[in-house]
Amino acid sequence: MFRHQKELQFEVKVDKPDPMLAKQVQEVLGGQFGEMTVMMQYLFQGFNCRGNEKYKDMLMDIGTEEIGHVEMLCSLISQLLDGASPEDQAEAAKDPATAAIMGGINPQHLLVSGLGGLPTNSQGVPWNGNYIVASGNLLADMRSNLHAESQGRLQVARLYHMTKDEGVRKVFRKMLARDRYHQYQWMEAINELEEKNGVVVPSSFPPEAEKEAQEEAYKFWDLSEGTASKEGPWSQGTSPDGTGKYVHVENPQPQGQAPNPNVPDPALHHDLTEEKVPSK
């Protein structure tokens, strides 16, 4: 059960309208790493979590918080669009000062949403359910969550420097702080799961099940010019799970055969046969 509370999680109050910034904020609302994505990702992971009640509760707690963040951004975008009108775009063509403020307005904010937030990114591309990851494997999902929060916080930090509006910056600071905590949270969950099950996903397919291929798990294939990558910890030392030592392969050679597929039926009109195909 979900219940909506009218008050926002944090105060949203801009100093002045800025339709161009509203367009840019759409990225952290409906973009690939926006609040809509983490909201849906955490909720679907929580909905589908079987057992492990503390993980399920955590996912539902944070997913529900992200619903509130979506509402905060919609409120922010609406305030940034206050007073915008179709005439503003016409005026922007006449006055460079007006153009700097109003010229970058997203037409869909006028035509589609009536000066409200949209489930799209900053370029107007609709939010896509394929952005989310909910695999049913807790460690794989938590790593995906850490990635999503890292990218999302990065984008908010970049937006922070694109405005001098202290009201907007105050909202962004709250989001940056919460996204920092969420990164901590996923790190803690990842550490706990790795200590319990190991660092490789899925842990239910152990190295010994790889049989003759096991040695391939420790080879670094150097396939670019130079040998700088040889100096990284991924190319020397012991694997994180302690099961083997890395080997740097400086000049790797192919181990498989050259493909020699059969030619398809001429009826597919592929023009691959050397013989002239009689017309029918």
Image (cartoon, rainbow, N blue to C red):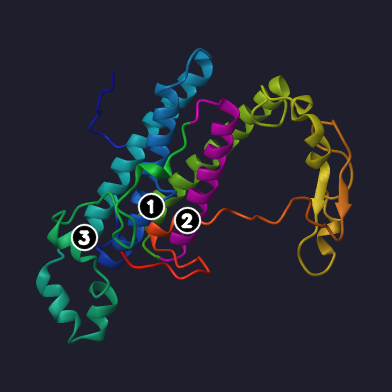
Tag nearer the camera, 2 or 1: 1
**Quarter of the view holding residue 193:** top right
Vertical side of 134 occupied by 274: above or below: below
Residue type indicated by callout 1? Gly
Pick whichever, 220 or 235, lies toward us.
220
Residue 253 placement, left or right of 200: right
Span of residues in magenta: 135-162
Q: Where's residue 32, x and y in %?
A: 42, 50
Mark sitting earlier along the chain (1/3): 1
> Where residue 31 is drawn, which disc sits there?
1
How far, Cα to Cα, is label 2 from label 1?
10 Å
Q: What element carries label 2?
A: helix
Q: Where's residue 125, x and y in %?
A: 31, 57
Residue 250 placement, left or right of 45: right
How far, Cα to Cα, is label 1 from label 3?
19 Å
Q: Where's residue 148, x and y in %?
A: 50, 44
Tag nearer the camera, 3 or 2: 2
Q: Mark 3 points at which residue?
A: 81
Q: Which residue is depicted at the point 79% across and 69% down?
A: 225
